[in-house]
Image: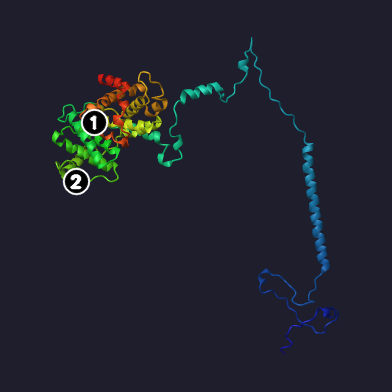
Amino acid sequence: MALRNRPILMNNVNKENVINTKSSITTKTTITKRAVFGELGNRVNTQRGVEPIDRTSLLLKEKKQTASKQNDDRLAEKVLDIIKEKPAKVQEKPRVQLSKPILKVQGPVETNLVETKPLAPTIPTTKETESFSSDLITFEDIDEDDKGNPILVSTYCNDIYEHLRNLEKKFPINKNYLTGQEVTPKMRSVLIDWLIEVHQQFRLMQETLYLTVAIIDRFLQSFQTIDRKRLQLVGVTAMFIASKYEEMYSPDVSDFAYITDHAYTKLEILQMELLIIRTLDYSFGRPLPLHFLRRYSKAGKALPIHHTMAKYFLEQSLIHYEMCHYPPSLIAAAAIYLAFIILDNNEEGSENSSVWTKTLEHYSTYTKEDVLPIAKKIAFIITNADKSKYQAVRKKYVNAKFMKISIRPELKAPTIIAMGIEGKQT
């Protein structure tokens, strides 16, 4: 019984015999679906010989399909021919030629009225461009080589120095501000001369010294009740504040108490610090002459000896009371101007544009006429430096570190002596 249900396996050789023989046994055949593709409804023959495929019907279907495709192709070709023939049948309209309107004017007609002028701006000739550039561009861009260095912020340099010039106007020091006070100009000079020596002993930065003097002048100008006994306390506290503002590692309060030989206690220094800070309204951003000097040295292409001599002039000016009311930018410009004249062996009367160039005039915003009177006053101070009672700056610049600027023979040249005499008279 198990053998009846097995499928019959035949060789390909016996296929023809099976087709020709007629089976007397009638079997029931059922059409089934594939299990996997049942949902697709594909019908297939499960047994050979059942529902033979009609080849003739398939050929007829293929012929009908090819005939319909040929008809479609013919129709498409006809449509294309019609489309191509249409533009040829349509007659083109003649183009309209636009002509300029002719104005009828009685009498002689000027040609300038008929011709139209172009709207685009005319390009100036080469001569005009050369004269235009030579008149406006008369200074050198000193920040051109620094554009690749982000630390130098060359894009913002001019804006920064413009801001510094506004700050020095915001925090001015009035001329003769000590008038009517117990503190005299001579006492101020003695104090600053001593602070320069303290500055050297502590080995502080240059900016700390300039800021110390600025704090002293601004405080004495605002708080006018300081007596001579507390003047040294003001100076020491001002340097203490400046060192905390400028230095990486500032000296301790006990160091400043020791430098005064314990004339003041640490508590007194801290109390004076609070008083100065409140009086100045916590504002210590007044620019220093050293800031502007570095800019002017770059604009004037100064050598190290020019820059060092100008710093010597600035520190000498710190001591003298008659120089404290000038703006820091103007004092720096006068210092570098005087250094150029002395070291380049130029006479002030015959001085040409090579000393105070257009570039210096542009970046300093000062002309030679603005700088010359202050330069003469500095020349008077320098020519009498060896006779002065205040020798701290002169001794400082005798050192080889500062190129022995204070004892150079150029400081006794006839040019600077003549300028000093004129500065004394003004």
Residue 117, placed above or below residue 41: above
Residue drawn where x is 79% and y is 81% of the image: 10
The three-letter code of the residue at mark 2 reads Ser
Q: For residue 175, what is the image quadrant?
A: top left
Relative placement, left or right, of 270 versus 9 is left
Which quarter of the rendering shows the C terminus? top left
Relative placement, left or right, of 269 versus 24 is left
Which quarter of the rendering shows the N terminus? bottom right
x then y, percent, for residue 407? 29, 30
Residue 258, placed above or below residue 390: below
SS of the residue under disc 1: helix
Residue at mark 1 to residue at mark 2: CA–CA distance: 26 Å
Which residue is under mark 1?
319
Residue 254: which numbered mark, if any?
2
Q: Does residue 172 show up? A: no
The three-letter code of the residue at mark 1 reads Ile
Residue 391: which numbered mark, if any?
none
Residue drawn where x is 25% and y is 42% of the image: 202
Count of numbered circles in the view: 2
Q: Residues within 10 Å of mark 1 (few under 14, many from 20)?
A: many
Of the pair 84 and 174, the residue shown nearer to us: 174
